[in-house]
Amino acid sequence: MPVRTSAPLPPEDPVPHLSRRSLLLSAAVAAGAGPLAAVARAADRTPKVLVIGLDGALLSRIKDADAPHLKALMAAGLTAPSSIYADPLAPTLSGPGWSTIITGVWPDKHNVKDNAFTGARFTRYPDFLTRAETAKPALSTYAVASWAPLTDTVFSAKADARVSTPSAEYDTGTTSRAVARLRDGDPDALFVHLDNIDHAGHTYGAASPQYLDALHGADAQVGQIVAAVRARPAYAAEDWLIMVTADHGHTDAGGHGGSTLQERQTFLIATGSALAPGSVRHDVKMPDVAASALAHLGIPLDPGWGLDGRPVQQPVPDDFDALRGSLATRVDETGIPAALAGFTHTPPPGWSVDDSAMGGGGVTEWRGWSFTTDEFWTQAQRDQNRESNIRARGVFAVADGDEWADKPYTGTFDSTLVSPAYPVTGGGTAVLTYTTYYRHESPQKGEVLVSYDGGTPVSVRTYTADVPSRTETVTLQVPVGATSARVRFRYTGGDNWYWVIDGVRIGTA
């Protein structure tokens, strides 16, 4: 079989002396406007953060609802649809969901598996207000919630104020308290939790008019809170990052906790000086809320914290994400919605796939290494742990022998994903990093090989047992005189399981 290669590389920058960033900065300075100029102006203002949590809200239903305030925030900033885990990592419940958002780590770290918070590791992975107070004790922090476990359990006493709204007041009381704090105090970071959308979802289902009514009501409350921000006397001297998010989705019939994509849905709507109006991204995940809040407050993210989140204000380019616009709809799969675009076999520029030893037949979507999304891949077959692929973002590469073998096939699954040539310094060390998730069944094997200057590939890591979703780091000893390194990810097997790769880089040690 042929080797799959990417499309031709784009022409070189016509002005090689200046980086794209330099040109953008020059243009921003000349124009005195635009996102970069806004960032420069924001540096002179006091950074402040507001996080609003809408329990059980679905982004798709916000778009259907009479929700002018949320839609205005979407128009003014970033909209990022996202998805979460399912069992066995954690069910799609509020306890794990809000713990992930508030701490900036996934359930395999904070260890919240249900709404009882048994075994939670909040001392090791504290909430973002606690981290802010620890780093900058002078900051004023405030949390108010309609669901008391958040302010009683997840946020620590290190926050300046934690308010659990009396149930009789519910979201009305939560909103009025948030508005009063913004009007009468000088908070630097606030978390506000509204619950009624989730209540409507449980009682009537996400497809009901009552769910839309609850969204409309929450939208009005978001509008009151945002208006209180903008009415502050010092607002012109403040740089607000406003983030709206949800802990999980809901089924049309009502309820959550399972593994359907609708239950696993979440989102981030965010406005701030570093976020382009009307922008949409697919590389944002739940833990990014805490990381973004801390970064906006000027708190360096210590690698020792083990955060899974990264600031939305600081996007990390990824080669595979460039493929989103070229993803195709299903061919042989039947469980995936027919209109959902989510796979391609064509690699991004600089990458290739060697299928010369790949078997024939099988399911088209998964014949050799494929590039896909969580929304597409997990719907190929639910409840086989694909939902635990939490640390891959956007578009990622997958070799899935299990799904490939769902139609008649010949031979074995033997496909190699080949990276571009990365520059290295001969005689020194380099660091290969990548996100991986590997589920094993013998005789399957995953192998990572590295070659220098077109030489013979040498194995640097082998997978023959399950590996949870994580970022791998491999130190490379670069041969004397070598100037480039290329990485190969070879998956061999048959009707076995799968291997995910994302975020591949080689840098200095």
Image (spheres, rainbow, N blue to C red):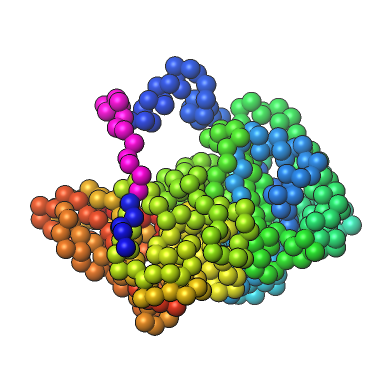
Vertical placement of residue 474 versus 34, above or below: below
Q: Nearer the viewer, residue 253 or 1?
A: 1
Across the whole image, how many numbered discs are drawn on residues?
0
Residue 200 makes an appearance in the image: yes
Outermost residue to the left: 481
Q: Is residue 10 magenta?
A: yes
To which quarter of the image does residue 47 belong? Answer: top right
Residue 156 makes an appearance in the image: no
Q: Is residue 294 left or right of residue 95?
A: left
Q: Is residue 175 magenta?
A: no
Residue lying at 41% horizontally and 48% vertically, measured from the top left: 318
Residue lying at 45% horizontally and 57% vertically, measured from the top left: 371
Locate residue 442, reporting x and y percent: 39, 83
Residue lying at 55% horizontally and 54% vertically, measured from the top left: 329
Q: Is residue 508 left or right of residue 185?
A: left
Q: Nearer the viewer, residue 491 or 216?
A: 491
To which quarter of the image does residue 417 belong? Answer: bottom left
Q: Which residues are magenta?
A: 6-18
Locate residue 324, reporting x and y percent: 49, 47
Residue lying at 20% horizontally and 60% vertically, measured from the top left: 451
Vertical placement of residue 28 versus 502, above or below: above
Outermost residue to the right: 168
Secondary structure mainly formed by the magenta segment: loop
Locate residue 157, reporting x and y percent: 65, 59
Vertical placement of residue 374 versus 292, above or below: below
Locate residue 107, reporting x and y percent: 57, 67
